[in-house]
Image (tube, helix red, strand yellow):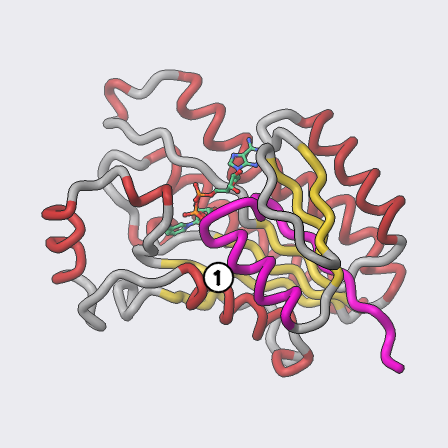
Amino acid sequence: MSEQKHALVTGGSRGIGSEIVKVLLSEGYEVWSLSRTKMDDRENLHHIGCDMADRSSTEAALESVIKQAGSMDVLVNNAGITRDGLIMRMKDEAWDEVLAVNLTSVFLTCRRISRLMASQRKGSIINISSVVGIMGNGGQTNYAASKAGIIGFSKSLARELASRSVRVNVVAPGFIDTAMTDALSGVLKEQIATQIPLGRIGKAVEVAEAVAFLASEKASYITGQVLAVDGGMAM
Ligand code: NAI
């Protein structure tokens, strides 16, 4: 019998994160989800409450995951927020909060889990960026800085961990139908869809399937890459 595989997903309670959790569970992983709210209970799913804007809350949650799991095969940094606004009116809190949740939390989880993965001499880390981190977007300087930061961070980490057989990749979703994009009006969504070569908004499960591929042995020779799942937006 093969050994039980373990995965840690941040922000696994809803949207793209909950689809990632479901796909990994269906592939036989035991999954730990770190988020403020909880998704429905499922077999082999553990929920750890955590505010990823808060360094000590994140570090404490990571220690309890490691205590429970003992080993970790896959880490997916998915938790993320937006606090949009034009730069001239952007409040310090909007900058600080977005950078804390979207980028500093990635540093904290990768720092702790990469120690474990390096000692195991195996592991796959997938960090969720955005096409906005590649293309930029007016009204999202804070969000774009955090998402572009994830790309540079992940490529550097991929170089640091490659000799230990730990792979690090980025998934950059385009416009995906979740609570994050629900706030936009139907008319605006239709306009956005006209800018997407595939002509439609993406589904969370389409991002989750790309993450599961990068997590798997099928991607054993892929590290330091950015995979856009965006219907062709950023090509
Ligand atoms: P969402 O708003 O539906 O879910 C975000 C998740 O992050 C939730 O599980 C939430 O609990 C968690 N989270 C947020 N702040 C947290 C905090 N302080 N502590 C702990 N957990 C926290 O968002 P969605 O759309 O599922 O986004 C997931 C990721 O994909 C994010 O990193 C987002 O930036 C990225 N993304 C989303 C796109 C979209 O069109 N929906 C496009 C490109 C990237």
Q: For the point 26% across and 37% down, which residue is it?
A: 183
Give left or right: position of 55 versus 3: left
Element type where label 1 sits in the image:
strand
Numbered circles on residues, count:
1
Give left or right: position of 57 versus 92: right
Residue picked out by circle 1: 171
Give left or right: position of 35 versus 142: right
Nearer-the-camera pick, 80 or 44: 44
Please provide percent x and percent y for residue 174: 33, 58
Please provide percent x and percent y for residue 206: 42, 68
Q: For the point 53% across and 52% down, which residue is it?
A: 17
Image quarter hosting the C terminus = bottom left
Q: Amino acid at mark 1?
A: Val
**Residues in magenta, as a range:** 1-26
**Ligand 1 has an atom within 8 Å of the beta carbon of the residue at disc 1:** no
- Residue 179, relative to residue 158: is it above or below? above
Give left or right: position of 184 versus 41: left
Q: For the point 72% across and 58% down, which residue is it?
A: 43
Q: For the point 56% across and 44% down, which residue is it?
A: 11
Q: Residue 49 magenta-drawn?
A: no
Image quarter hosting the N terminus = bottom right
Please provide percent x and percent y for residue 110: 70, 48
- Residue 173, relative to residue 102: is it above or below? below
- Residue 160, relative to residue 64: is it above or below? below
Neighbours of disc 1 within 10 Å: few (<14), some (14-19), many (20+): many
Q: Residue 9 magenta-drawn?
A: yes
Nearer-the-camera pick, 44 or 94: 44
Q: Quadrant of residue 179?
A: top left
Please provide percent x and percent y for residue 157: 66, 56
